[in-house]
Image (cartoon, rainbow, N blue to C red):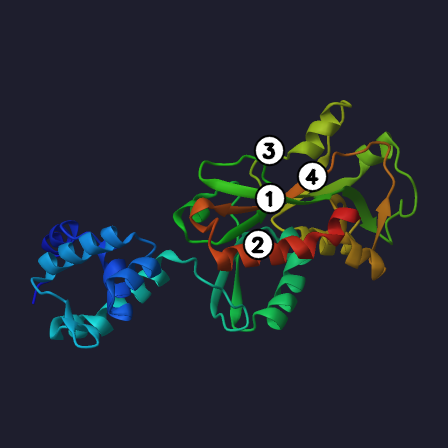
Amino acid sequence: MINDSGSMLGELRSIDLNLLVALRALLDEKHVSRAAEKAGLSQPGMSRALQRLRSMFNDPLLVKADSGYALTPRAKAADRALRQVLSDIQNIVSPPEFNPKLASGDWRISAFDYEYVVLLPTIVSRLREEAPGMRVRAIAIDGLDFSPLMRGDLHLTLTAANPVPPSLYRKRLFEETNVCIASVKHPYAGQKLDFERFMECKQVWVNVFGPDPGAIDHTLASHNLSRDLTMIVPSFSLACHIVACTELIAILPKRVVMPFVESGLVCIMDLPITFPNFTIFLYWHERHNKDPQHVWFRKLISDITLPLQET
């Protein structure tokens, strides 16, 4: 049978759904005055509701009997169905609950390798502990393209990209500092680079936002300086490996280079210039803003980054 939804909606429009609340009270109490009190109506108001219900059902529903009032067979037949309908309506309008221990599914996140290196291991560790049925799908972000997030293909994006497209929310997570690194075997390792030596060094550039090198080169340009970019790579981690194995130097986010510094592969070089910090943001679409599951996951990420806000 074909379900004519237009016809069904037309019939529902002719029904005052508030009457179902009154009917529930009447079925439970089998008494007009007590039903009125239970439903928060006056007795005359409940009496009027009963008259309208009798007209709608074409049945008296509640009739006098020796012990007070009794339900008609039609009212008894409606009892169980009405209980289920009102329960379903309550479930529809009530905010859904999220239990991370019982949850399952995927979190689709996009970011550059910097955000993944710094945050993803801790995110996965916390999820294994608090929401073991949830998985993370880490997807490479494409420059400044927020369209996958806008379309709903992603749940979250972690990035330093600053513009906020329409319909997106964002939260500031933490700031990061750029530092200059070189191999511990570099001729200038452990020395402070003056402008002349800095300009002399061949460098690796990590291209994540397209042809514009960004804040680093804008800062250099303000001092009438430029870099000799010998190699362009798509990954901060790859840049660290290249620096460790060559005489190339690189200006990279401090947190992503520290594992290489601590392992004795590269060293941080002092420069005669300070580069501006940049901020990591968490982006999400407004469709998920009030979703309890999404709110929970955003808070988890925010909690993870709290220590980073102090360093």
Q: Are marks 1 and 2 in contact (CB under 8 Å)?
A: yes
User: What's the residue type where badge 1 is placed?
Assistant: Lys
Q: Specify the amino acid type for callout 2.
A: Arg
Mark with earlier residue (4, 3) = 3
Q: Residue furthest right?
A: 191
Q: Along the horizontal axis of the image, is 270 left or right of 169?
A: right
The alpha-carbon separation of the residues under discs 3 and 1 comes to 25 Å
Q: Tell me the element at label 1.
A: strand
Q: Is residue 50 left or right of residue 86?
A: left
Disc 1 target residue: 171
Among the two numbered marks 1 and 4 on one chain, the one whose residue lies closer to the N terminus:
1
Q: Circles 1 and 4: CB distance less than 8 Å?
A: no
- Answer yes or no: do the residues labelled 2 and 3 have beta carbons within 8 Å? no
Residue 64 occupies quadrant: bottom left
Q: Circle 4 is placed at which residue position?
A: 278
Camera-side residue of 158 and 191: 158
Q: Secondary structure at mark 2?
A: helix
The mark that comes first in sequence, 1 or 2, is 1
- Judge by depth and name the residue closer to the eye, 74 or 187: 74
Name the disc covering residue 256, or none.
none
Q: CA distance from mark 1 to mark 4?
A: 14 Å
Kindly identify which numbered label has been placed on residue 298: 2
